[in-house]
Image: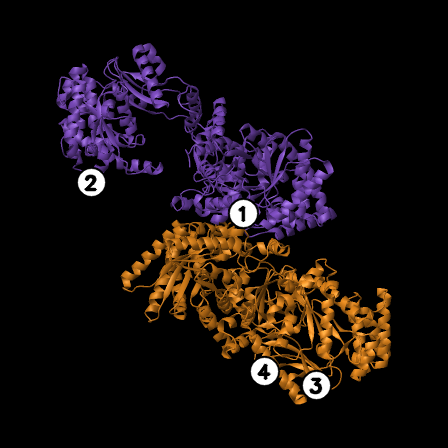
Chain colours: A purple, B orange
Amino acid sequence: MRDKVLNKYVYDFEEGNATMKDLLGSKGANLSQMVQNGMPVPPGFIVTTKACVEFLEGESFLVDKIWPDIQKAILRMEAKTGKKWGSGPTPLLVSVRSGAPVSMPGMMDSVLNLGLNRDTLEYMAEASQNRRFALDSYRRLIQMFGEVVAGLSPDLFEKVLDEAKKKNNLLYDYQIPAQILEEIVAAYLHIYESHTHSSFPYDPWKQLKMALAAVFKSWNNPRAITYRNLHSIPHNLGTAVSIVSMVFGNLNEQCGTGVCFTRNPSDGSADLYGEFLINAQGEDVVAGVRTPIPISELRYMMADMFNQLVDITGSLERFYKDMQDVEFTIENRKLYILQTRSGKRSAEAAVRIAHDMVQENLIGKSEALTRVTPREAELLLHKQIGSQVDVPLVAEGLPASPGACSGMIVFSPEAAVQWNDEGKNVILVRPETSPDDIHGLAVAEGVVTSRGGMTSHAAVVARGMGKPCVSGCEELFIDVDEKVLYGESLILKEGDIITVDGSNGRVYAGEAPLVDAKITKELSVFLQWADEAASLEVWANADTPEDARRAREFGAKGIGLCRTEHMFMAQDRLPVMEHMIMAPDKESRLKDLELLKEMQKNDFADIFREMSGCPVIIRLLDPPLHEFLPKENVIRQQLFEMQREKESPAQKKKILEMEAVLKKIEMLKEINPMMGFRGCRLGILHPEIYEAQIRAIFEAALLVLGERKAVFPEIMIPLVGLSEEMEIFREMVDRIAEEYYKSTGIIVDYKVGSMIEVPHSVLVADKIAKVADFFSFGTNDLTQAVFAYSRDDAESKFLRAYLQKGILQENPFHTLDREGVGEMMRLCVKKARETRQNMSLGICGEHGGNPESIAFCHIIGLNYVSCSPFRIPVARLAAAQAALGFIN
Amino acid sequence: MRDKVLNKYVYDFEEGNATMKDLLGSKGANLSQMVQNGMPVPPGFIVTTKACVEFLEGESFLVDKIWPDIQKAILRMEAKTGKKWGSGPTPLLVSVRSGAPVSMPGMMDSVLNLGLNRDTLEYMAEASQNRRFALDSYRRLIQMFGEVVAGLSPDLFEKVLDEAKKKNNLLYDYQIPAQILEEIVAAYLHIYESHTHSSFPYDPWKQLKMALAAVFKSWNNPRAITYRNLHSIPHNLGTAVSIVSMVFGNLNEQCGTGVCFTRNPSDGSADLYGEFLINAQGEDVVAGVRTPIPISELRYMMADMFNQLVDITGSLERFYKDMQDVEFTIENRKLYILQTRSGKRSAEAAVRIAHDMVQENLIGKSEALTRVTPREAELLLHKQIGSQVDVPLVAEGLPASPGACSGMIVFSPEAAVQWNDEGKNVILVRPETSPDDIHGLAVAEGVVTSRGGMTSHAAVVARGMGKPCVSGCEELFIDVDEKVLYGESLILKEGDIITVDGSNGRVYAGEAPLVDAKITKELSVFLQWADEAASLEVWANADTPEDARRAREFGAKGIGLCRTEHMFMAQDRLPVMEHMIMAPDKESRLKDLELLKEMQKNDFADIFREMSGCPVIIRLLDPPLHEFLPKENVIRQQLFEMQREKESPAQKKKILEMEAVLKKIEMLKEINPMMGFRGCRLGILHPEIYEAQIRAIFEAALLVLGERKAVFPEIMIPLVGLSEEMEIFREMVDRIAEEYYKSTGIIVDYKVGSMIEVPHSVLVADKIAKVADFFSFGTNDLTQAVFAYSRDDAESKFLRAYLQKGILQENPFHTLDREGVGEMMRLCVKKARETRQNMSLGICGEHGGNPESIAFCHIIGLNYVSCSPFRIPVARLAAAQAALGFIN
C-alpha cells in the first residue's frame, strides 16, 4: 500500500482533496476538492510535485516511467468527456497547467489546446460549427508550444500576426477571418520548423509529453527562482501539473468566461463580485481589449448560469471558510469551474471579511484574528498612494514612516512654519533633522531626509506623529543653503511639489493621487477581540495631550513613554531652557527651573486628564543639554556678522552672551554623544533639574486628583546602568512624594522605575529591581549598545550593505534581534522577577510597534508593549496573534 | 572555660601571642609574642579590642566592670618590676597605648608617664638621681593627659613652653633647667584646672581609668574614621590598649633609644639598619632636633647592647619571616624591646628581600611572591619623582601613565619633533591627542592633556611607550594657537620647563629631581618564580619590532595585540594610505594596497623575527578611515588661503583634490564614530584592504620561515559582532593561506580569531567559536558598550563625579567591572568552550595590565593576558598572586 502511494505519480481529480496541496499543488488540490464536492469541473488529472522534483533531480526518464499512468488517465478522460484524444468526431483537447503547493502567480508556464493537429483541427471545426474558432485555437497552440516547449521568442509570432492585421486593416485579433488565420497557421508552422529544425509534433501524445517536461522545467526558470527567493519559498517543493480537458467560452453566444470573488475584495462587503465576457476566452477578460461586464449582469443574461454560480461560489466559501477567487467558463450553457483559491483583498476588506465571517458563525474569533496581517492593520491608518502612479520617481530611501502625502518642498523648519501659515502643504526636506526642527516637523505633511535610518530623529518623530517619512535617501543631494534638491535625474527647488510614499520609501516629483484611510466600526470590534485574545497590553508612546487622546482612541491602555524633552523644545520654552543651562549660579538656575516646572506641570495635567484611570509613565529629561542650545555654526555666523558692524554697548553685551553660549557648547561637546552626558547622568550631576520635573509631576497629579480624576503617574529614569543610580532617584522621588503628602494630606499613587537600555543595567537588574517598581526596555539604545551600531550612522554607513549581503537577515533597529538583544532582555526579565516576582515589565523602544518583536515580548513574558499611537492597532493585533501562537 | 574566655578582657603579655591580633591588637600581640620568645619587653598587659567595642557600644560601665582585673594586673606588674604603683621608693609609671588589629599609624591616641603626681615625682627624682628628668616627665604627662583625656588644645601648653624658652634665651626643650620646669609644671597644672574646672588627678588609678576610656574613644576620632574609610578597614574592629611599664632612655649616658630595621628598607640589603640616640626619649629620635647616630655605631659605644640587639632582631626576623621594624630603649644599660612589626620598604627592597629570604630558606617562593605588590613591580620600571619636590604645582589630572619626567613645553607634534632634533627634551602639551600626533608622542618625554581619561589616546599610547602621562587636566586651559598654557595660578609658554608625575597625576613648573628605575637580577629571578606559579601567561601589546624586543626582555610569552594601523601613520605611509582611501576606482585602490602590503610585510617580518617561536596576534585594520585623512579644519584653512591667491593651473588641480578630500571626510563623518564604520565593518565593505593585510602577514611569515625561524602568526578580526562576519574572514584567510601553500609548498602555522568587544559577540560566542581559533577580549570597547560610556568623553564629563560620589567604586576603564563586563566575559568563556573546549582565550584591553583585573581573568579561566610591555612585570606578578589566591 505504502509502495503504491510512493510510486503513484498521477491522480485523477476524483482521487484528491484540498488537504493534498503539497503533492497536488494548490490548484490541483482545490480542483480535486471541488470534484469531491460534486461541482462541475472539467475532467482532468494531476501529475504530482514529487514527479516534478524527481524529474528535475535528473531522473529525466521519469516521464517515460509514468507515461503508462498518464495514458490510462487520458483514456479515463475520454470516457468522462465522450471526446476522442487525437481523433474525431469530437477531439479531446487538454491544457497542461503548472500549480505549486504555494501560490506563485504567473511565474511558471502552461500550454493550452494540446491535442490539435492538422486532422483534429478539421474535426474541431466540424464539431464546433466554427472553423475560425478551430483555426484560432490551433494558432494559439503553435505559438504557446513554440514559446514554452521550444523556447522561441514571442516576437517571431507576434510579428506575423501584426503584419497580417496591418495588411488587412484589422485592429484586433478576434476580427481576423478564417481564411487569413489559415495563412497565419501556415506561417507559424514554418516559424516553428525553421527555428527548431523539426516539424511541429503531430502526435497528441508527443505534444503532451513535451509540454509536461517543459512545465516541469519552468519551476526553475529565473523568474520563478527570484520569486521564491523574495517570498522565502523553499526551492525543493516542485510544481504539480494539472492536465485538464479544455472547455471553451468562445464557441458562440451561449458561451462565456469570467472571474468572480465571493465578497468585494476592495471593501469586503458580502456580494458576489467580478466580471465576465460572452463568447470569449479567459485571456480576453484580462487583456482589456473588450470591456468585461459586471457579474451582476449575468443574472439578466443567463439566469440559470448566474444562480448556479451563486450556489457554487457560496458553497465554496462555506467549505473553505474564506473569501474565494473563482474562475469559470460557460460552454454551450454549461458552467465549468476552472479554479478556486482564497482571494487577495485590501486591508480594509480583510478586516471587514474577518469581522463579518465571525458574525456569520463561519469562523471563530481566533481564526478571524489570523486573517488580517499586522501590516494590513497598519495600512488602514495611513493615506496610501493609489495604484496608478504616473509621476516620475525622484529617489528611493528607507520606508521610515508609512503613509503617503504630497506637498511643496521646504528646506528649513522656519520656511515650513511660514508656508504652512500661508495655507500651503509642505514637505520638509533636510539632510537630517534634530529636535530643533520639531516645529517644522509639526506643520509638515511629511519628511524626507538624505541621511539617517529607520530610527533617525526624523523617522521616530514622523512615526510618532503618524506622518509619512522617507529617510536615508542617499541618492539625494540636498543643498539647504541654495534651496535645491538634486536627484539622480531631476533637480527640484523650494516650492516644487513632491509626493512622499513612506510605506515604500519612495519620493516622486509632482502630486500622485492618494487614497484615504478609514477607521471602520468593524476594525474597532476586531481589535476588541484582539485585546481579549492577547496577554500583552498595548500602551502608547505619547508626549502631548493630543497624542494621548489619539492613543486612547486607538485603544492604548496606558502611556508607556511620555518624553519630557519635547516640551522644552516649544518656542516659548526653549529660551528659558537655554537660560537655565547658561545660568551662572545655582540660584539663577533654580529660578529658571521653577518657571519650567510650572509649564511642565500644565502639560502633565493635560495628559493626566486625557489618560484618567490609566498609568502614565513619564521619563525624566534624557537628551544631552547641548540639544537645547542653538547650533554652533548659527552662533558663529551671527557673531561674525555682528562683529563686522559698529559695536553699540547693547551689541557688545549680546556678543559677550553669545560667546558664553559658544563656550558652553564647546564644553558640552562630545565625540560619541550617544554614550555621553545624558539621561540620568544629567540627573546625578544636576539633581535640581530632575527635582523640578518630579515636582511638576506631583503638582500636576494633585491638580487632577482635585478634579476627582484617577491619576497614576509613573516616573521613569532614563539610561540607568547601575543600581546606585536608581537608589539615588528612588530616594529623591520618595522624599518629594512624602513632602507633598505632608503638605496636602493627599496620597498620590505613584511608581518609580527604570529604562533598561544600557547593557550594564541588564546584568545588575536584580539589584536595580530592589528599588525600581517597573522596567521598560528602551530597545533602540539597547540595540545600539549591544551591536555597537550608532543609530545615527550605522544604517547609511554599513547596515544596508550588511542586509544586502545577507550578513544580517533583518535590520535590528526595525525587528528586534532575538539572538543578542533578545537574550539580554530574557536575562533581565529573569533577574528582575527573581527580585520582584510581579514586576511590571514593558518595552517602549521602536520595536514595541513591530509585530515580530511584539511576539518576542509576549514569549519572554512582558506585561505591555508601548508604541506610537498610529501603531497601536498593529500592536494590538500582533499581541493577539502572538498569544494565539500565530506569530512567534 | 568558654565563659571565662568570653569574659576575659585583660591579658598579661605572658598570656598572648602573635596570632591574637584581632583580640590584642597588632602591637599587643607582637609584644606578647616577644615575651613568649623570652625577649626583654617591659612588663605589661593588654585590654582587649572586645572591651573597646563594648565600651563604644554604650557599655560605659565596662571600665568599672573590668577594673578589678586591671588592678590585679597592675599588682602583678609591681611584682615583676619591683616598682610601686603611686608610691616610692621607685614608683611604677605606665604608658597607655592604642593598638588596632590592623596598623593605623598615628591615628589614635596614647598617654605616657601615668602614675606621676606631686608625690611620686619626688620619688622619681630621688630614684633617678635626676630631678630635671622627673619634672620633664611630669610636664609631658600633664600636657598629654590634658590633650588626650580632657581634649585641651596643644597650643595652650606650647605657648607656656615657648614663652619660658624665650624668656630664658633657650632654643630647645632639653635645655630647660629643672627650676624653670618647676614653673612650667605649675603653669600646666593651672591650665588644666582652669579649663577643665577640676584639678589634675592625683590618684594614679584615676589617671589610668580616665586615660583608658579616652584611648578607647580615640577609635572614633574623625582622623581614624577617615583613615579606615580610605583603607577599607571595618569600623567595628575596635582598638586594644596596651598598658606597659615605662622604661627611660633619658636617665643618663647609660641610657638610649632607637629604631632599627633588620634589613635596609631602601635597597633591601641584609644589614641591620637604623639609628639611635644616647640619653634620649623615643620622640627625640623622630623630632630631628638632635641628629641620630647610625645603628652600626652602637657596636662601638655599647657593644653588649649592640650584640644583644643583633641577636634579638635577627631572632625576630626569623620568627616572623619578614623584615622587622623594631623600637628599643636602653635603660641603665638594660635593653628593652618596645615594639616590633613588619617594616615598610621601597619597591626595590621589597623584591630584593623577598628574593633573598627565599635564598636563605626563610620563606618559600609562593610566600615570596605575595611580599611584593603589583604596584611595586610597576614602580620599578619607571622614573620617579624624588621625595623632595620644591617646584610649584601647576595642576592635577589623572595619573594616566606612571613615571616622571621633565622637559620643555611644546604644543604641537611638529614642534616636538623639531625641538627633539635640536637635542631638547620636550613634553607634549595638548588639549587631547590623536593618531596624527604619534610622531610628536614618539619623541616627547611625556604628555599632558587637558581632556581625555585613563584610556584616552594620549594615555594609552603613553602607557604603551612607557612614558609618563597626565591626562584630563581640566584646570588647564591650553591655547595651542597662542602657545600658552594657563594654569590655576601660573601661566607657562612654549619652552618653559615642567615636570610631569604620571604616577600621581601632577604637573609641576620647573625641573623636579628624578629617581632612576632599575631592573635588578633579583627582579628577574623573582618574576621567573611568578611565571612558575601562574597559570595565566602574560603576552604583550606591541606594534613595532622595538616594542616586541622590549616585551620579550620583560618576559612576554607572545604578542597578544599587534595593531596594524600605527604602521600606516608613519610619515612615509600616510600619503599612500590617503591615496588609497581617495582612490576613484578599485584598480587604483589595489595598486595603493600593493604598496602598503609591501611596507607592512617588512614590519611584520621584523616583529616575527623578534618573537621567533612565540605566537604573534596581528589585528587587522580597526580605526575609521577618516583617521587617516587630514583634519577637516586644516584643509579648510589651506583651501581658504589658496583661494585668496591667484590661481595657477597647478593650484587649481590642488584645490580640486583638496575639495575631493573634504567631500570624502564629509562622507565618512559620523555622529558616534566609536559605534560606527570601523573594525571588520571596513573589511566587509572593503575586503581588498583586509586581503592586502592578510597577504602581507603570510608573505612576512614565509620570509622569516625561510630564515629558519619559527613563526606563529595569528590573525585577529576586530569588532566582530556576528558569526556571519567571522565566517567571511575565516573563509578569506583560509583561502589566501591555501593559495600561498599552493604556490610555495610551505605550510604556515596560522590561526584566525576574533576580538570580543561588541556585546553581541558575547551572546553568539558559541556560533563565532565554530569559525574562530581564539578569542581576545577587547575590554576597552566592551566596557564602553556595556556601560554606554564613551571612552573619549565619559571620564571628563561625569565619570569623575560618579567616583567622587561613590556611585562607582572604581573607574571601569581602569579596573575591570566584574558585575557587568565581567559577567559578559564569563558568559562568553562558557559559550566559547561549549563549542571549542580548548579554545585559547585572552584579553588585550587596557585591563590586561591591571592586577585586580588580571585576578579576574585567572578566575574565569583565560589563557593569557596581554598588556603594554612596561606592565608585563606587574602582570606576571599579578598572574602569580591570582594563582596563589592572594588577590582575587
Tell me the amino acid under the disc marked 1.
Ala
Q: What chain is tagged by disc 2? A: A
Left of A42 or right of it: where is A533? Answer: right
Q: Amino acid at mark 2?
A: Gly
What residue sits 62% from the left and 86% below the top?
Answer: B307
Residue underneath mark 3: B333
> Between A664 and B619, which is closer to the camera in this rendering?
B619
* B140 sits left or right of B40 in the view: right
| Residue B254 falls in image quadrant | bottom right
Label for residue A58?
A: 2
Does residue B647 appear in the picture of this structure?
A: no
Count numbered badges in the picture: 4
Q: Residues within 10 Å of mark 2 (few under 14, many from 20)?
A: few
Residue B271 badge: 4
Q: Position of residue A206 (x, y in %)?
A: 14, 30
- Where is mark 1, residue-wise? A765
* Residue at figure coordinates x 83%, y 82% from the top left: B177
Structural distance between the alpha carbons of marks 3 and 4: 24 Å
Secondary element under disc 3, as helix, strand or loop, is loop
User: Residue B576: x and y, percent?
Assistant: 43, 60
Q: Spatial distance from mark 2 to mark 3, Cα to Cα?
A: 114 Å
